[in-house]
Amino acid sequence: MLALQSLTAARMAAEIPGVTLEEARKVLAALTRGEPLGAPIAGVRRITLEALRAHGSVPTLTVIDEAASREDPFRKLVLETHDGYRIETVRIPLEKAGRFSVCVSSQAGCALACAFCATGRLGLQRNLESWEIVEQVRLVRATLDRKAGQRVHGVVFQGMGEPMANIDRVIEAVQVLSEPSGLAIDARAVTVCTAGLPSGIRRLARECPRVRLALSLSSARPAVRRSLMPIDKAHPLEDVLEAAAEHARLTGMAPLWAVTLLQGVNDSDEDARALAALARSFAEKTGVRPRVSIVPYNRIDDATDPFHRVPDAGLEAFRDAMASAGIVPHVRYSGGHDVAAACGQLAGRVPAASPAASPALHEG
């Protein structure tokens, strides 16, 4: 049975007998408004609704915990799949009041084992289906006060898992998220992040040319990067950047380079100069200058965590060293760390004090 929220209007019309394209658009609009499957929809025939019920359903994920940061407007949902895996989704406030981005997971767990990431310690449990990705956005949307004008403006594939390792389902989800008659999120407001899988980067460029690309680098120095990101052994940074250059040339969009700074590991002036030199080289080859984002480290709640956050003064010193080398990076605000919702902290954990039942979501 088809999960209807994983279909574009064109695919719904093609795969469900008797459904016209115009009816499919109206059905998607109704589902986006939260109307139940099979309820009367203006302009949709009864026989079409019967076909939808016969061939499709609208499955969901179970919300087992919802945690709001006490320090900023970030909010995290811990969700459970039908087969018992836990994933996490984060609602991120944007600068313009009432607009939010949704940080979605693409896998339960992750196989890449990046040293600074809690998800990487879980190992890969399974890929998420496209509907499970889309459903994360729908569930976050349900927490918004839509009568007050709150809305989901963008989506970032930066939650649990490596999106490029599940690229088929990620591309399907992107197409559905940007469906005009559905969630209608501008593809330019969608960012897919990767630790470095060149084949996935190239497919994203070809099949979703309006979607933005973000790379997790860790370090421009190969030995340092390899010690932090085992994927570098299979896909060296040079190969990853060649794929990113192809993405930049095909799309005309600047990639985002994210570097999580770890005290005493990759935060030296030498690291800063190497990163700036790499960014300048990329710009010379492609005509597109990458946007470099420095990410403060968020400690994993684990006694074996070997890393430490770089103090604010150290972040600024790294930024200044890069600026003096010709590249001015942005220091990212990484919110929600008090509820383990920040970059690198997602692991499907539920605090002991949290209720077992799903909390009520706002239905505004």
Image (spheres, rainbow, N blue to C red):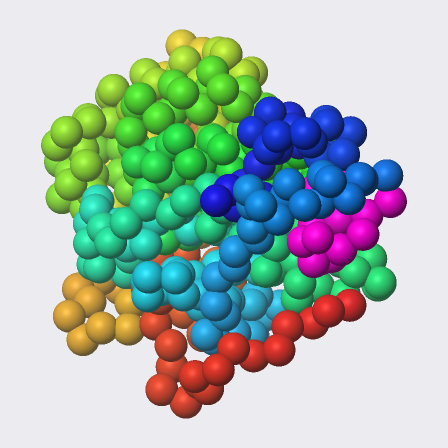
Whole-percent x, y for residue 102 in the image: 56, 52
Whole-percent x, y for residue 350 in the image: 38, 77
- Residue 335 versus residue 234 in the image, above or below: below
- Residue 310 versus residue 41 in the image, above or below: below
Q: Quadrant of residue 324?
A: top left
Residue 175 falls inside the magenta stretch: no
- Residue 345 versus residue 114 in the image, above or below: below
Quarter of the figure that contains the C terminus: bottom right
In the image, which residues are magenta? 26-42
What residue appears at the point 78 percent right and 29 percent down from the top-left corner? 22
Whole-percent x, y for residue 262 in the image: 27, 55
Judging depth in this view, the residue of 220 and 110 nearest the camera is 110
Q: Quadrant of residue 8?
A: top right
What residue appears at the point 44 percent right and 24 percent down from the top-left corner? 204
Whole-percent x, y for residue 93 in the image: 64, 58
What residue appears at the point 24 percent right and 27 percent down from the top-left corner? 237
Could one spot residue 151 in this view of the protein? no
Judging depth in this view, the residue of 15 and 219 nearest the camera is 15
Direction from residue 154 to residue 104 in the image, left or right: left
- Residue 60 versus residue 206 in the image, above or below: below
Residue 34 falls inside the magenta stretch: yes
Could one spot residue 211 in this view of the protein? yes
What residue appears at the point 34 percent right and 37 percent down from the top-left corner? 166
